[in-house]
Image (tube, rainbow, N blue to C red):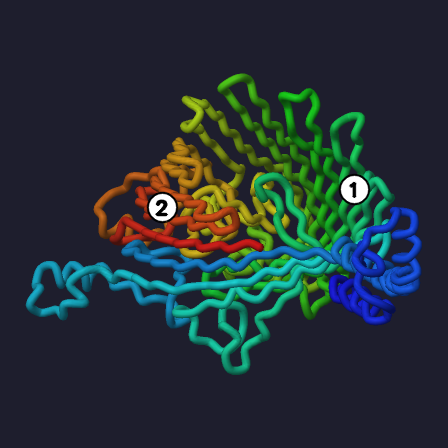
Amino acid sequence: MSDLRYISSFLSALVVIPGKALDLRVGHGRPTTWQGLLRVQWLRVGPGLILAAFGLIPGLIGGAALAADERSMLDRFQYNGDILYRGYYLWRDLPMANNPTTSGQARREQSWADYQLCQAFPSQCSSISQTPNKESEDYSTIRFRLNMAFRPSPYADILYAIEVGHLTFGRESSTSGPGSGGRGSGRVNIETRELLLNLHNQSRVLNGDLGVFNFSTPSGIVIASSGAGGRIRYDWQSLRSTIEAIYVHAVDQSHIDGDSNGFSDTNFADNKLGLLEWKFSTPRYLKGSVYGVASADDDPAKSDPVESSQELSRMYWGGLFVTGKWQSLSLMLHGIGNWGSFSRPLASDPVVAKILADPNDPMNGFFSTAVKAPARKKYHLNAGAFQSALRIQLSDFVYVEFLAAAASGRIPGDTELDGSSIDFRSDQFRTAGSSFSYMEIALDDSGGYSIFAGGQLTGVIARGLQLNWQLNPELALELAWFDLNAVQTPVIHTNSKYMLFTDTNEISNDLGTEWNARLSWKVFQDFRINARLGWFNADKGYKALNDVAYGDDIYEFALYLKQTF
């Protein structure tokens, strides 16, 4: 646009130039003195040059102003984003506590008696019944993310992130809820992931955010989610550190799918959560953070007789995350403490519930009369979790890591020795919304199969060895082996299949082993392809915990294609 203005101005000036074009000869072609020549030529072209100059001025001014406006708009608006496609292939012959299925109904496991009958008399069984039931499925998901930043002034930014998806195809057939693909009466698959007003000083040392934003603790063991609230961040440059304080009133838990049926269990949890974190990088070989999290989910309205089954709680977490590097060695240590209290209806207390369930107990009549809503009992919590990694750099392209992670308590799905719920244990590690992806299947929150939903580490000890090899600047290979054990030996006195049909009384903490392989290909600067493979082989502890009569393996293959812009 500015170039057109220059050209039009110059052409309009040439049109009004009187006389001939600029000529260095006068009269009959005889040259004159240079002073006379200039005088004559000035009389011929001078007025035209003046007009041409005045014609160019508006173009110059307008073009410069327009270019300045364009630069200003570019400075005041920025965007980026990505599109992610994921293709899954899943296979298993091992029953799971939570069965992801294609039909939305719990998969019918073939009984042990049917299996043994088919093994003994194969001609009497159909081909489908001759082996234990297997599950195999494949499906795809795709999502689009767009991040936009508007900068109306030197002291304020408006940040907005919109996400379309994940749209799931080839799995759920329902018409509503997450994962439906938005068909029929399904929800619109457009979601606001971030929307906030960012206020800051000119040097951006002090920042304040108001709105909906993402936040997490290191590794996502305590929480990794989004919420609505406020955040303040101060960059303490002299100490090479950052202090961040967050207050969130509503925490997004739509990603939690505890029963693995493809639907979120809750959407926004209306509880108050605070996070205070100090990130440091001094001395230079040491980096880390000290953080504290507080969660208050104790709305008195939940304790009325109508909702007397709701738990009220105040939970606290404190953590130290440190990484250090010395020559070819790198070490990461992460310790977490979990304290707090929670209250539940008195009728759900294990001791009281046992009395109420036994009509012959002499105290049954008293408790049946005395224990009424909203009578509650308070319990206290004192638990912890730990994570570590030791990296050894073998060469410029290869390194190995020794990994470990654990949390106190009993594994979800286990019971106490007397058959009561493990939720009342004082050492049962809790999270505010875990999203811990440690491996592909057992402890994972990235999609596909997941034995411990959300990467819930409670009651689990995970140890592993990982090899990373940079094959070339664009291609990287990662191989990993993990061994999983239970902190507490699973209680199996209520087991009806594993102990009966496998003819063993052996009790084990061994849950199983998992092998992972990942291949990452950087096709272009902004386009990547990742292939991931996971294989979980169950051991006696897993089979006893889930009362498994047969089956051993779970397989998962995932292909990721991601284009950023």
Amino acid beneath label 2: Tyr
Q: Which residue is mark 1?
A: 233
Amino acid beneath label 1: Arg
Residue 51 seen in render:
yes
Is residue 51 shown above or below 209? below
Residue 563, percent from left and from top: 51, 55
The circle drawn on residue 542 is 2
User: Between 522 and 193, which is closer to the camera in this rendering?
Assistant: 522
User: Between 409 and 565, which is closer to the camera in this rendering?
Assistant: 565
The circle drawn on residue 280 is none
Q: Residue at x 13, y 63 (%)?
A: 118
Residue 263, percent from left and from top: 51, 66
Side (left or right) of 253 relative to 294: left
| Label 2 SS | helix
Where on the picture, by quarter, is residue 334?
Answer: top right
Is residue 521 shown above or below 180? above
Q: Residue at x 41, y 22 (%)?
A: 394
User: Between 515 and 375, which is closer to the camera in this rendering?
Assistant: 515
Q: Residue at x 87, y 59 (%)?
A: 61
Residue 210 seen in render:
no
Residue 472, percent from left and from top: 40, 35
